Image (tube, rainbow, N blue to C red):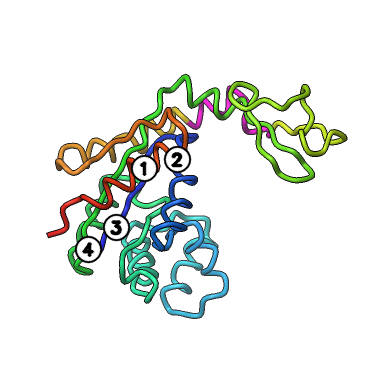
């Protein structure tokens, strides 16, 4: 039985970093619903046309169609040994649909929550700075540049603070997460299948815990 890895956690928890490490080291594809929707612009299937028409009207894509898109993508050969889901499920209703899909595919869902204290999340996001030349990412709290607000590798380049990394926007994103996505964690917790890792550590330490969970999770 293959595994569907569902990474969860608030914005700034490091889900993207862990998904990339899992993809590189375990050879599992990262299936992003965002990428699926973007690919619809060029797809010529009846399902793609149906979803495009909904999006062109400015409407939200219903859960039923989203799960059909996920089913279509995960039926491809690169998903035969399992896959990582990015951006899905987002609600308990979507999680129920995913359970049905997993049963149909003969897969086992492994939901993992990357748990990070709110204060740390805020510092991770509001403290981010990046070099406009090479893209190097810094953090004024955890990884400051050697010289104030300039890149270590390009001293002529002033670091950029993204507009959406301000305190107001970050707090709004975290509030949305608590309101919309936290119930998904409770869904898996009540089902007795949720696994959590301490996300306040270094990425490699977090990865080792996640890899251990994936390797030992019961798939009988």
Look at the numbered discs 4 and 3 and tell me whether their residues touch, using CB distance below 8 Å.
Answer: yes
Quadrant assignment for the C terminus: bottom left
Image x and y of residue 141, in percent: 60, 21
Which of the numbered marks, if any, corresponds to residue 4?
3
Nearer-N-terminus badge (4/1): 4
Nearer-N-terminus badge (2/4): 4
Look at the numbered discs 4 and 1 and tell me whether their residues touch, using CB distance below 8 Å.
Answer: no
Is residue 60 depicted above or below 75 in this figure?
Answer: above
Q: At 42% across and 63% down in the image, what residue appears?
A: 29
Which of the numbered marks, if any, corresponds to residue 107?
4
Nearer-N-terminus badge (3/1): 3
Is residue 85 depicted above or below 132 in this figure?
Answer: below
Look at the numbered discs 1 and 2 and tell me whether their residues touch, using CB distance below 8 Å.
Answer: yes
Q: Nearer the viewer, mark 2 or mark 3?
A: 2
Segment tinted magenta in the rendering: 162-173
Q: At 44% across and 57% down in the image, what residue appears?
A: 23
Q: Is residue 181 left or right of residue 132?
A: left
Identify the residue under disc 2: 204
User: What's the distance in space between the residues labelled 2 and 3, CA to CA?
Assistant: 21 Å
User: Crowding near pointer 1: few (<14 within 10 Å), some, many (20+)?
Assistant: few
Which SS class for mark 4?
Answer: strand
Look at the numbered discs 2 and 3 and tell me whether their residues touch, using CB distance below 8 Å.
Answer: no
Which of the numbered marks, if any, corresponds to residue 208?
1
Image x and y of residue 213, in percent: 26, 46
């Amino acid at each position: 039985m293959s595994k569907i890895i569902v990474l969860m956690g608030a914005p700034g928890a490091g889900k993207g970093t862990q998904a990339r490490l899992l993809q590189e080291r375990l050879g599992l594809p990262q299936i992003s619903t965002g990428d699926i929707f973007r690919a619809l612009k060029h797809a010529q299937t009846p399902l793609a046309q149906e979803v495009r028409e909904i999006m062109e009207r400015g409407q939200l894509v219903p859960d039923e169609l989203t799960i059909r898109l996920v089913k279509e993508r995960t039926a491809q050969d690169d998903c035969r040994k399992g896959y990582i889901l990015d951006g899905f499920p987002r609600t308990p209703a979507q999680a129920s649909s995913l359970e049905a899909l997993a049963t149909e595919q003969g897969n086992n869902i492994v939901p993992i929550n990357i748990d990070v204290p709110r204060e740390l999340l805020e510092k991770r996001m509001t403290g981010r700075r990046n070099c406009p030349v090479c893209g190097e990412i810094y953090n004024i709290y955890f990884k400051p540049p050697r010289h104030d607000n300039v890149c270590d590798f390009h001293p002529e380049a002033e670091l950029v603070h993204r507009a959406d990394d301000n305190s107001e926007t970050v707090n709004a994103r975290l509030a949305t997460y608590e309101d919309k996505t936290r119930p998904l964690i409770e869904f898996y917790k009540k089902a007795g299948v949720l696994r959590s890792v301490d996300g306040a550590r270094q990425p490699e330490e977090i990865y080792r815990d996640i890899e251990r969970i994936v390797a030992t999770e019961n798939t009988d």
